[in-house]
């Protein structure tokens, strides 16, 4: 049951992607013999797509802003020099 808690925390970190209903439906009882492969695939999806890809997109955006800022500084120097 420990791995279910870790998976639930991971899913809550990335924004609660409707974890409970996806694997257990309307049942509030969580059994120990749940779909383990499904849990592993869902955790891999959450880590790869939600965490790593979003951080990559944010990093690319920030570095792109720095390039534009440097270009604007050069234009400013050319105009007012």
Image (cartoon, helix red, strand yellow):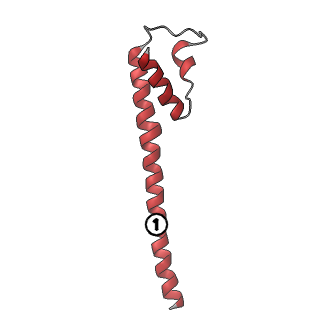
Q: Badge 1, how many Cα within 10 Å: few under 14, some, many 20+?
A: few
Front-lying residue, 28 or 56: 28
- Residue at 39 percent across and 22 percent down: it is 40
- Locate residue 8, reporting x and y percent: 50, 24
- Residue at 46 percent across and 50 percent down: it is 57
Decide: is 3 above or below 48.
above
- Locate residue 23, reporting x and y percent: 51, 16
Decide: is 45 above or below 34.
below
- Locate residue 25, reporting x and y percent: 57, 13
Which residue occupies the extreme front position in the image? 2
Quadrant of image for the N terminus = top left
Decide: is 3 above or below 78.
above
- Residue at 51 percent across and 34 percent down: it is 13
- Locate residue 26, reporting x and y percent: 61, 12
- Residue at 46 percent across and 80 percent down: it is 74
Circle count: 1
At numbered mark 1, what does the secondary structure look like: helix, strand or loop?
helix
Decide: is 53 above or below 32.
below
Which residue occupies the extreme bottom position in the image? 81
The residue tagged 1 is 66
The part of the image, by quadrant, that contains residue 64 is bottom left
């Amino acid at each position: 049951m420990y791995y279910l808690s870790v998976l639930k925390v991971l899913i809550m970190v990335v924004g609660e992607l409707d974890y409970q209903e996806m694997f257990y439906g309307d049942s509030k009882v969580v059994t120990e013999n749940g779909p383990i492969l499904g849990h592993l695939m869902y955790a891999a999806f959450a880590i790869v797509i939600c965490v790593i890809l979003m951080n990559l997109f944010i990093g690319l955006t920030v570095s792109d802003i720095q390039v534009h800022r440097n270009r604007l500084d050069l234009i400013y120097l050319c105009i007012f020099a």
